[in-house]
Image (spheres, rainbow, N blue to C red):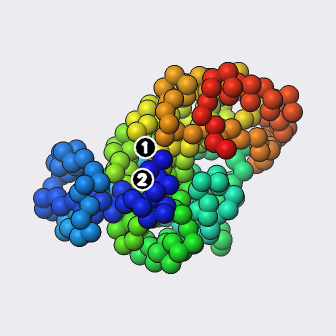
Amino acid sequence: MIFLKKAENEAISNFLIAKCIEVEDFGGLKLEDLWEIHNSIKVKEKYFDGEFKKPNLLDLKIEIARNIFKNCHFCEHRCYVNREKDRGFCKIRKSYYSSEFLHMGEERILIPSHTIFFCGCNFKCVFCQNWDISQVYFEKIPCYCHPYNPKDMAKIIERKRIYSKNVNFVGGEPTPHLLSILETLKYVNLNIPVVWNSNMYLTIEALKLLDGVVDLYLTDFKFGNNTCAERLSKVKNYFDIVKRNHIFVKEYDMIIRHLVMPNHLQCCTERIFKFIKENLDRKNILVNVMFQYRPEYKAKFYNDINRPLTYEEMDMAMELAKKYKLNLIL
Ligand code: SF4
């Protein structure tokens, strides 16, 4: 994984390369014209010369994200609301975060990971284990959520880089905060790989903005069909969208997490593993089969998921991982 070299400063992180790519002056252009310039550029390591251009590709991505923010389609709910004044499905307007710290509980190759927990989410998972930060926009913002300032966070990221192997944007969900995240990276001037820790319900437009910015996708692949997703996370067309998005980013380093849930071995776990085997069987993609499901938040009202996993279910999940010869993370 090239990501590991970036963590050790032996290769350059994508967002730094994007800052070295000069783009034509885009002031006053419409969104479709901004996209035209954007889509004509491909980020390659050879463009890195250590000199940040003005305007550069990252500036252009920020300008496009500002446009999308005013007609929001960062995720496939496609609310098309102006988030300066209105709220869409996620209810998020300005960005808040609950905490940032050097996380030692992520996968071994990622730690210490400087993890930034954004508040709010575009999913409403009834079993959410982070519901106290993911669902805050539906009530009053609690005192443990702080207003997010990109410049200040950039300074914190730079300060912690001495210990951290990467910066890890998570939540809740980072997708509704894409503009804030790009603005943060504008002010980060040292080499640090970017981890996108997400439910992957993004639009293609949002994925194109991340293309050439993110270094590793840390994905949360929950459901193997649309029906379970709609019932338990309140999102439509989940499986189709998340499959599409994994294929879209398959050239990147990736860790796919799957949280095994009780009674969802056939309908979800097996179908996800089969999809991975058939479409994402690559050296740069690892799979983490997770067993720490516990019935949190509203899970007690759903008979199928109102208990932890049994040992039989854990064994069955590992048998399925073997059957599909997944490239499991150690
Ligand atoms: S991030 Fe998604 S859910 Fe939130 S307003 Fe935008 S499109 Fe809607």
- SS category of the residue bearing label 1: loop
Residue 136 point in image, percent of width and height:
63, 59
Q: Position of residue 135 (x, y in %)?
A: 63, 54
Residue drawn at x 43%, y 37% as measured from the top left? 250
- The residue carrying mark 2 is 214
Choose the circle earlier in sequence order: 2 or 1: 2
Q: Which residue extends farthest front?
A: 10
Instruction: Compare residues 42 and 81 and report the one nearer the observer.
Output: 42
Circle 2/circle 1 CB separation < 8 Å:
yes
Q: Where is residue 300 shown, x and y percent of the image?
A: 82, 40
Q: Residue shown at 39%/71% (left/top)?
A: 190
**Residue at image location 55% in from the left, 25% down from the top:** 277
Name the foreground residue: 174 vs 115. Answer: 115
Estimate how packed mark 2 is, as few (under 14), some (14 to 19) or many (20 or more) residues with alpha carbons within 10 Å: many
Q: Is residue 188 above or below residue 315?
A: below
Residue beneath label 1, please? 252
Q: Assess disc 1: are there few (<14), some (14-19) or many (≥20) residues with their C-alpha within 10 Å of its C-alpha.
A: some
Q: Nearer the viewer, residue 297 or 191?
A: 191
Question: Quarter of the image holding residue 304?
Answer: top right
Position of 146 relative to 15 (above/below)? below
* CA distance for labels 2 and 1: 8 Å
Query: Is label 1's Cβ within 8 Å of ligand 1?
Result: no
Secondary structure at badge 2 equals loop
Identify the residue at the far left of this view.
Answer: 24
Image check: 83 left or right of 117? left
Report the residue at 36% width, 72% height from top: 189
Indicate left or right for 308 with 129 as reference. Answer: right
Q: Amino acid at mark 1?
A: Tyr
Against 201, is 166 above or below? below
